[in-house]
Amino acid sequence: MDNEKSSMEKVNKFRDDRDWRQFHNEKDLAISISLEASELLELFQWKSAEEVKEFNLGRIKEELADVLIYSHMLADNLNLNIDSIIDEKLKKNNKKYPVSKSKGNNNKYTDFE
Amino acid sequence: MDNEKSSMEKVNKFRDDRDWRQFHNEKDLAISISLEASELLELFQWKSAEEVKEFNLGRIKEELADVLIYSHMLADNLNLNIDSIIDEKLKKNNKKYPVSKSKGNNNKYTDFE
Amino acid sequence: MDNEKSSMEKVNKFRDDRDWRQFHNEKDLAISISLEASELLELFQWKSAEEVKEFNLGRIKEELADVLIYSHMLADNLNLNIDSIIDEKLKKNNKKYPVSKSKGNNNKYTDFE
Amino acid sequence: MDNEKSSMEKVNKFRDDRDWRQFHNEKDLAISISLEASELLELFQWKSAEEVKEFNLGRIKEELADVLIYSHMLADNLNLNIDSIIDEKLKKNNKKYPVSKSKGNNNKYTDFE
């Protein structure tokens, strides 16, 4: 696979090669992201974080990749640029959680939405 | 904010500026991804995909960005490269769903995990 | 199985027969409820509600039962009575959504948390 | 509220008093169960199970009740009896996890789906 393509270009090629875009309404893609996030979370259940990292890194990679792949598909359907929406949200969080008040502050953090 | 930085560098700067990495065990980050995916999904509930796009694009951007931001944090905690794990998973899916068998094929698609 | 036992008694017997209560911390039980809810939701994905009912009622029964079984386990761990917490929440919702204002009212409904 | 009514009768009365059944297609109800399960899970995030029980029992009651209320609504839409589907699933699990093999057995448990 061509490594000079961006992740978005690769995801788009994958589904366009299969003509799958016709099945991808945004509501079901949002369900997909949620389901893949659950499959990722399942790997951490009944275990400490340390146990998971030691034994399940291969599965974590795959499930996290699925979350990201469906997120790219939803973003593309809505003409959203992944890097731009991350940048905008971080700027908004930056105002909401100024470094001066939130540095090392666990209480503040637990209110982080 | 510096636009030449990658999304990962920006996410890392955001949490390192606040010393928040100490709170971010991977199990709770996996919970975060799942919770943000639910907040995203909530925007699509009781509506058709069309209604959501028309009225809620601003909120969709933010919730999708949250999914992505926590995904970057978990990836960084585990020393995973976002683009690499996407590329590897697409290659795996490519074998599982060969174009010749899966093109325009809805049945195939519904088995897509 | 004894049909005069309540669902809670049956769920308790199931896990106590296996000595599984020792593994059931409440945080992981809450994760279980969320994961089972996702498995239930997965049955409805890429389909209309009608298609699901026609083809998947057997699976829906099982996944909905799993949501309920883990909900009973978490309730029992916390000494909560299932019928009482439902009754209390309906009373609270009753005040929040008075019949006079919310009857047949879709707008109101979409704000229902 | 009449305490001799079953939980199902109370849930049905609540939504029928408001004529809300018309909005409740099963796919969106399944989404509701998943979203409420996430709100419940959120209470346990960034905390140990002990911290949650001490400080958040009131909120846990409400979110667990919401999971149960939507589960009742979905069951009623599909003409399912809550106690029967729990009983059937426990019988199936009973065969899958015989007491002789699964008693006190954590490994077995982690494969519990």
Image (cartoon, coloured by chain):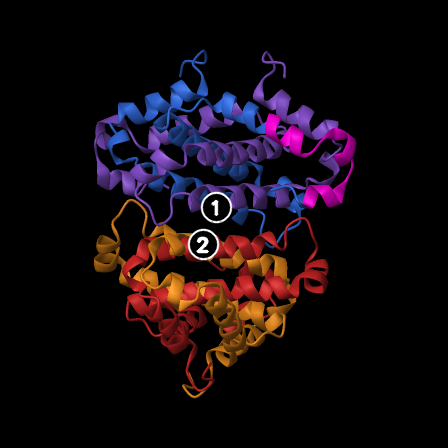
Chain colours: A orange, B red, C blue, D purple
On screen, residue A98 above or below D108: below
In the rendered image, which residue does mark 1 sit on? D38
In the rendered image, which residue does mark 2 sit on? B34
Q: In the image, is residue C104 part of the stretch drawn in magenta?
A: yes
Are the residues tagged 1 and 2 within 8 Å (C-beta)? Answer: yes
Q: Which structural element holds mark 2? A: helix
What's the residue at 39%, 71% (across, down)?
B14
Rendered image quadrant of residue D52? top left
Q: Which residues are magenta?
A: C91-110
Q: CA distance from mark 1 to mark 2?
A: 8 Å
What's the residue at 47%, 56% (across, down)?
A113
Residue extending furthest toward the front: A100
Rendered image quadrant of residue B106? bottom right
Rendered image quadrant of residue B92? bottom left
Residue A71 picture location, percent across and down: 51, 66
Q: Amino acid at mark 2?
A: Ser
Q: Amino acid at mark 1?
A: Ser
On screen, residue A44 above or below B75: above
- Packing grade of label 1 (10 A; few <14, some 14-19, many >=20) is many
Viewer-closest of A70 and B57: B57
Viewer-closest of B6 and C95: C95
Q: Is residue D86 visible?
A: yes
